[in-house]
Image: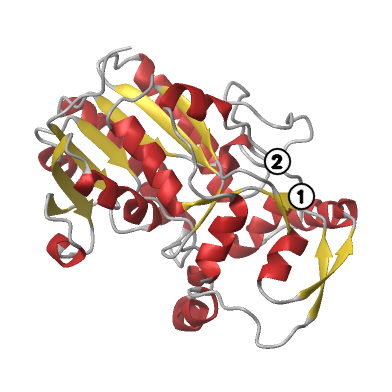
Amino acid sequence: MAAPETDLTVAVTGPTGTFGNGLVPLLQADDRVTRIVGIARRPFDPAERGWTKMEYRRGDVRDPAALEEAFAGADVVVHLAFLITGNASRQTTRAINVDGTLNVFRAAASAGARRFVYASSVAAYGWHPDNPEPIPEDWPVRPAARLFYAQEKAELEQLLGAESATTPGLALYLLRPSIVLGPNAVGAKDVLPGPLAPLGRRLFGRPRRLPVTIPVVAPGLRLQVVHEEDVGRALQLCVVAAGPPGAYNIAGDGVLTVADVAREFGALPIPVPAAPAELAARAVARLPFLPPAAEWVEAASRPVIMDTAKAKQQLGWRPRYTGWEALRATLA
């Protein structure tokens, strides 16, 4: 395997999100990276964040010309921009997530980039009854039954694979993180619509321990989590080509349960079997006319526990935080 490259120019879409906050400080401190281009719709000052290597470019993933201009001279393009929740219509969400991702890949190819690093998700595997446990990277990604986020992640991996097959000069790296936690983690804070969005940010944007111990029913549902910094390190290793192209599962060591999470919030968990909760989640997920936020119930219908051996062996990645520690860092 060739040695990791140096003197790199790296273009990053969505640099100020959760994944960007995990990655960009590592690129800033990495002597192999000399220049970073940050592409976002909303203006920001990289210097205020200490990102002195970064140049801001205003751009939209729906604008191929702006992307090609921003990617000029880039050796690596890291695509992190993606709508998870919010108030956008399904058409707008797809235009940004699916069409926009393909625009970014094609613009990276046109600009002569050598590597394309895409942040996919554990959700790309879907919640299917025949999924193995733990699930390896060579298991096929398949769209979920209902959740649009998981459907788009699976579809995009398949589309990017097809694009990559006809673009041999652009190596494709796919990261599949589990639930991402940490001080900058976002997601649930944008669930509530329109004028209620500020309330959602107050309720969910900064998790807190409960002031008193409250009993809560805690189904034995299992999940993996990963700290945002560990996702950033995995992205960084792809940027510098520390391992071969391909897909990599990324998760902190250990598997948590809903009871574990409740306990960390200061609640008193009352354990109940997982099966009834999974059955109920599958039933709710099949209901017609679910709002986008409610579609996430499908994620509770069946656990997806990933095998992370490939990332450790081929990328040299090691999580610094266990799942427990990632949860505690978020609450802290």
Quadrant where the image shows the N terminus: top left
Q: Give the mark, 2 or 1, whose residue is nearer the N terminus.
A: 2
Q: Label 1's element?
A: loop
Q: Is residue 64 visible?
A: no
CA–CA distance in space, label 2 to label 1: 7 Å
Please name the residue shown 61% across and 37% down the image. 143
Q: How many marks?
A: 2
On the rendered structure, is 141 left or right of 279? left
Q: Quadrant of residue 128?
A: top right
Residue 74 on image: x %, y %: 15, 33
Question: Residue 32 in the image: x percent, y percent?
Answer: 18, 34
Please provide percent x and percent y for residue 200: 51, 78
Compared to residue 78, the image places residue 88 above or below, namely below
**Residue in view at x 30 percent, y 25 percent:** 241
Q: Position of residue 89 (x, y in %)?
A: 45, 61
Task: Tell me, for residue 72, which label it has, or none.
Answer: none
Mark 2 packing: few (<14 Cα in 10 Å), some, or many (20+)? Answer: many
Amino acid bearing label 1: Ser
Task: Tell me which residue sits at (29%, 33%) in the image.
Answer: 239
Q: Which residue is mark 1?
A: 301
The colour scheme is: secondary structure
Q: Are marks 2 and 1 in contact (CB under 8 Å)?
A: yes
Give the residue at the far front of this rendering.
320
Q: Quadrant of residue 34?
A: top left
Q: Secondary structure at mark 2?
A: loop
Q: Which residue is mark 2?
A: 127
Residue at x 25%, y 36% (from the top left corner): 77
- The foreground one among 4 and 287 is 4
Which residue is more in the foreground, 47 or 44? 47
Q: Mark 2 belongs to which amino acid?
A: Trp
Q: Using the image, determine if residue 113 lies above or below residue 209.
A: above
Q: Say left or right for 332 vs 281.
A: left
